[in-house]
Amino acid sequence: MMITRRHWLITLTVILMAVAILFAMERPPICTCGYVKLWEGTVNGPGNSQHIADWYTFSHITHGFVFYAIARLLLPGRPVGLWLIAATLAEMSWEVLENSPFIIDRYRHATMAVGYSGDSILNSVADGCWMILGFLFAARMPWKATLAMALFFETFTLWKIRDNLTLNVIMLVAPIEAVRDWQAGYSQPEG
């Protein structure tokens, strides 16, 4: 696996471009609480999607697994560094779209994220970095190990918070009332 300095610089540029767009969208740089936490464990609290890591970090790592697999299928023979750039472009484009009024409203109305107000810029950048970590894991490990890790993340977060990447996508695209009711019925794990 070869990722050149040039690939890393372009990847960083993609992240910085997303940061500039998020600033232009007037997203808060850090949590409006005024401090930065490494881990935010309250799923439906005001600190979710505001700090460096939270329960949805597992989904962003899984994005990296998925983007690696897609790049491997769609860009065979191209440098892995190009795959990384494409994956980062996809992830950071999602981070910008996710913080648009349309998607924020969609999360509030279609999912269990009733009080969701979007991500801080710090969280969006961290999500991009978590995706890159997942991408690098997938690039270095056998596909069975990556698949096992993805299934573990999906099962673990489903068990802990009644949500995961699969349910998040389903509920955003085609909400199911029974799933929303089930998700809302959990008792909040301690931070």
Image: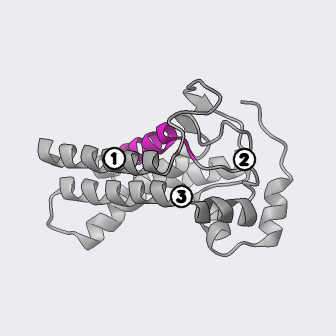
Q: Which mark is residue 159?
A: none
N-term mark: 1 or 3: 1
Which residue is at the far top? 35
Classify mark 2: residues with Cα within 10 Å, few (<14), some (14-19) or many (20+).
Answer: many
Secondary element at image label 1: helix
Label 2 to label 1: alpha-carbon separation: 29 Å
> In the image shown, does 179 or 155 lie closer to the viewer?
179
* Residue holding disc 2: 161
User: Residue 148: in sight, yes or no?
Assistant: no
User: Residue 161: in sight, yes or no?
Assistant: yes
The residue depicted at 72 percent of the width and 37 percent of the height is 42
Q: Which mark is residue 15?
A: 1
Secondary structure of the magenta portion, mostly? Answer: helix
The residue depicted at 60 percent of the width and 50 percent of the height is 118
Using residue 123 as the reference point, say whether residue 112 is left or right of it.
Answer: right
On screen, 32 above or below 61? above
Q: Position of residue 18 (x, y in %)?
A: 38, 50
Classify mark 3: residues with Cα within 10 Å, few (<14), some (14-19) or many (20+).
Answer: some
Looking at the rendering, which quadrant does residue 55 occupy?
A: top right
The residue depicted at 60 percent of the width and 60 percent of the height is 101
Label 3 to label 2: alpha-carbon separation: 20 Å
Q: Which mark is residue 98?
A: 3
Q: Which residues are magenta?
A: 119-133
For badge 3, the amino acid type reads: Glu
Looking at the rendering, which quadrant does residue 120 occupy?
A: top right
On screen, 37 above or below 110? above
